[in-house]
Image: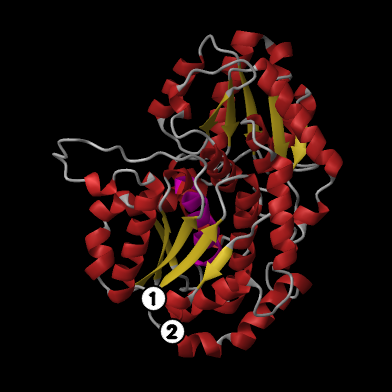
Amino acid sequence: MKTIELDIQHALYFAEKEYDGLKEAAVKAVTTVHDGSGPGSDFLGWVDLPSKTDEALVDRIIATADRLRERCDYVVCVGIGGSYLGAKAVTTALQDNFADFYLPRPKEPKLLYAGQNISEEYTEELCRLLKGKKFGIIVISKSGTTTEPAIAFRVLKDLLEAQAGKEEAKDLIVAITDASKGALRAMADKEGYETYVIPDNVGGRFSVLTPVGLLPIAVAGHDIKTLLLGAKDMERATALPDEGNIAQTYARMRNALYQSGKKIELLVNYNPKLHYIAEWWKQLYGESEGKDGKGIFPASVDLTTDLHSMGQWIQEGERTIFETVISVKKPAVTHRVPQNAENLDGINYLAGKNIDEVNKMAELGTLIAHEEGGVPVIRLELPAIDEYSLGQLIYFFEKGCGISGYILGVNPFNQPGVEAYKKNMFALLEKPGYEEATKEIKKKLK
């Protein structure tokens, strides 16, 4: 099977001196990821996860997915951050662009998401959609007390039990949580839900290749064994700290650009199926590197769409950005531009060409324009949008993230800043145990 290719030639000369200067740091960072000698080493379980995933576990996940596919028209995945973004990234990439507009078919349930926001309208409209429908729930939470998914699960659990009955409902709920502790573990044990474990040594944003991502992906009807195979092959390809390690090269190049003043990385795609890959990538890199007053700001654009909105800024705005372009070598289908006798739109010069050929020329033309405009471009080429390629891509970005964080000099596996808003929110809501914080925050509001 073909592998992902990385090209840094359109970025290297922008920061060649910095890139050369990071050779030893990059080698050390790869070694640190593998020997567990750096900060956050308790969360390195993802490094060899693809090769160590038990086949029996994968078979059980597939069996659970088949049960939900057999009995449900909709399956709601309840979670936030890494508990839903990885699954959504993969399923959106692999599904028909207009899948959401088709009605569910037997053994082909629609995958929905909840607990990723605290919107009253979203919650009410989701319940309205599910009223009278056959649905199941995959609830994902290490603790079971994270506010957004906890609210969503409570609401959906009540609706499911009211419609299907408590006994039936317990067979339609699957909990992915801690092995032995936490509110969701206690509830699952009490109610008799089927459960899967979130490994202690794998953080949420690195969890897509655990049951957290694999079960929803399997429910959506995709081949998780091939996804894991792609990841396993990339694990092997990025194991050594040498020039052939593309994750090491990517991490080294982006840090060189950062040192040269390029503070913003745009992840660019030319296929709308990859939109949520970018959303997952933004959490992965933003949460891993944005700390200690450091970090490249991760942003994304969908091209050519956003060339008609963001293109001007990218071309001529402040020169603090660089791009990482995900290019897909071969589309899954072909569709040609038709000939038109009147040619009123003036595009007969494109007649007979595959639409993807036009897209590729737009991609190449944009690369040349942006590079000449002072924007370094790193290019990743995927052989196709399929399970194997996506498995490679996920692991490539995870490995690159760990290496890049260590080159940067931060702990890539913690997220201390995430708690700040929660403390304020709990104080404002007068949560028990936050009495002093409530008093202090109310003083600030006067």
Residue 289 lies in magenta, yes or no?
A: yes
In the image: residue 325, left or right of residue 226: left
- The label shown at residue 262 is 1
In this rendering, is residue 43 above or below 160?
A: below
Question: Taken as a whole, is the magenta stretch helix, strand or loop?
Answer: helix
Residue at disc 1, secondary structure: loop
In the image: residue 283, left or right of residue 376: right
Residue 264 seen in the figure: yes
Q: Residue at x 74, y 19 (%)?
A: 171
Residues tagged 2 and 1 counted as in contact (Cβ below 8 A) = yes
Amino acid type at image mark 1: Lys
Residue 12 lies in magenta, yes or no?
A: no
In this rendering, is residue 316 above or below 325?
A: below
Q: Residue at x 49, y 61 (%)?
A: 286
Residue that badge 2 annotates: 15
Mark 2 vs mark 1: in front: 2
In the image: residue 247, left or right of residue 307: right
Q: What stretch is highlighted in magenta?
A: 275-290
Amino acid type at image mark 2: Ala
